[in-house]
Amino acid sequence: MSSSRFTSFREFYPYYLQEHSNRTCRRLHFVGTTLVISIVVTAVTTGQYAWLWAIPVAGYGFAWLGHYGFEKNRPATFKHPFYSLLGDFAMYRDICLGRISF
């Protein structure tokens, strides 16, 4: 499947999942996304918005470790940033629902 051109998220998501076939990579994405959600909830509920600086560190740090260390590919974020962000949350949802193995 070509990664150069997608006209919809529906077309992109199978490619995204293909780029996350390594179980450890998916697990690291899951941890990073869980941390991102936790940081946002904590910052909003406590009013300590300074914690928001940690969002890209948590999200990208775990994801990129998964890609470079285990998946052995470049994150799709570099070519498809918006679809990749949507893909991360869609994959998170699918893992939580048991559609994708954790």
Image (spheres, rainbow, N blue to C red):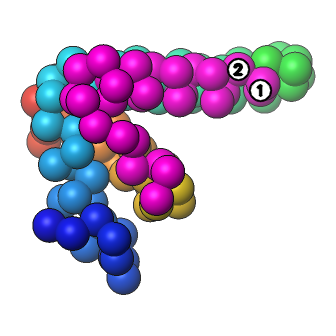
Q: Nearer the viewer, residue 89 or 18?
A: 18
Q: Residue at x 40, y 19 (%)?
A: 65
The residue where tag 1 is placed is 52
Q: Which mark is residue 33?
A: none
Q: Nearer the viewer, residue 23 or 30?
A: 23
Q: Nearer the viewer, residue 42 or 87?
A: 87
Label 2 residue SS: helix
Q: Is residue 21 above or below residue 12?
A: above
> Magenta stretch containing residue 75, yes or no?
yes
Q: Is residue 84 above or below residue 102?
A: below
Q: Residue at x 46, y 60 (%)?
A: 80
User: Residue 20's quadrant in the figure?
Assistant: top left
Label pair 2/1, CB-CB below 8 angstroms = yes
| Residue 62 location (% of width, % of height) | 45, 20
Asked whether residue 77 appears in the rendered view, the answer is: yes
Quick check: 23 left or right of 56? Answer: left
Label 1 residue SS: helix
**What's under tag 1, amino acid-wise?**
Leu
Q: Residue at x 78, y 24 (%)?
A: 53
Q: Residue at x 53, y 29 (%)?
A: 60
Numbered range of the magenta stretch: 52-79
